[in-house]
Amino acid sequence: MAFLEITGLRKRFGALEILKGIDLTLDRGGFLVLVGPSGCGKSTLLSTIAGLETISEGTISIAGEVVNDRHPSKRDIAMVFQSYALYPNMSVAQNIAFGLEMRGVPKPERDKAVAEVAKMLQIEHLLNRKPGQLSGGQRQRVAMGRALVRNPRVFLFDEPLSNLDAKLRVDMRTEIKRLHQKTGATIVYVTHDQIEAMTLATKIAVLKDGELQQVGTPSEIYNRPANLFVADFMGSPA
Ligand code: ADP
Ligand code: MG
């Protein structure tokens, strides 16, 4: 049984149908990369998985349980956005610990968890700084730390590297791959960067106008694109 299972998912905003019947599964520990042009519904799909948007039809199950009506805070999912959305007045350590504090985790345990995550992300030396004193890449690490520390069942990443310069993007890509291998996390990751998709994914899903065009391993998608759109989008050899 797949860990994350999406069946017949439709999402309408008023009369406009944005997701037109999505079927998608992901095994525990899998790294699904969702690609597609701007406006095709990638962020909307992540938001429905996170529970930040309701769905019009279909089901979303995690670990065999339908979570359609479950509040976002009860889904055990962490989302990392392209804008870092850190709390500007809190230190890095407080930012990372915040979610645990809300859950009533005692201070010694919080401190231990923050120290572990900071070590993993190599931001130990930044723990007392405020977000405003960090570079874009450092802020992105803190945002990841905040997600990691909660040890959620599923991570959702929405173009987390799109605001970084090219060099940093490559470094962070390597970092994310390493974290995935190390933690065995289950990840759904949105990007419009084909190289990011090819290097990170265990499975790629190509979305166009709210419809999946193809789902497969990076090599299947690249070498055997289902249609011209996929071939074009992934830059497959003609
Ligand atoms: P992507 O992330 O692939 O760029 P989005 O999921 O953000 O695309 O958006 C898909 C479409 O849904 C867009 O046309 C967008 O304008 C529309 N959309 C997103 N959120 C809303 C909303 N809250 N109300 C109405 N339309 C929306
Ligand atoms: Mg988006």
Image (cartoon, helix red, strand yellow):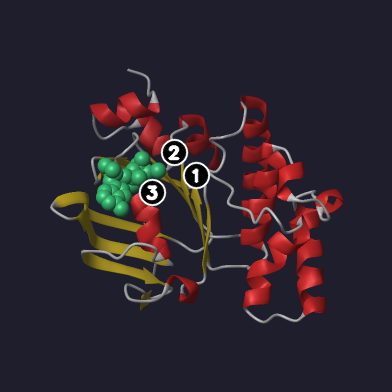
Marks 1 and 2, how far apart in space? 7 Å
Marks 2 and 3, how far apart in space? 21 Å
Residue type at the position of mark 3:
Ser
Q: Secondary structure at mark 2?
A: helix
Residue 222 placement: quadrant: top left
Residue 134 position, x and y percent, is 74, 42
Q: Secondary structure at mark 1?
A: loop
Residue type at the position of mark 1:
Ala
Mark nearer the viewer, 2 or 3:
3
Please tell me which of labels 3 and 1 falls first in the chain.
3
Picture mark count: 3
**Left or right of residue 201: residue 170:** right
Are dots 1 and 2 in contact, CB under 8 Å?
yes
Q: Is residue 201 above or below residue 167?
A: below
Question: What residue does disc 1 label?
Answer: 201
Question: What residue does disc 2 label?
Answer: 218
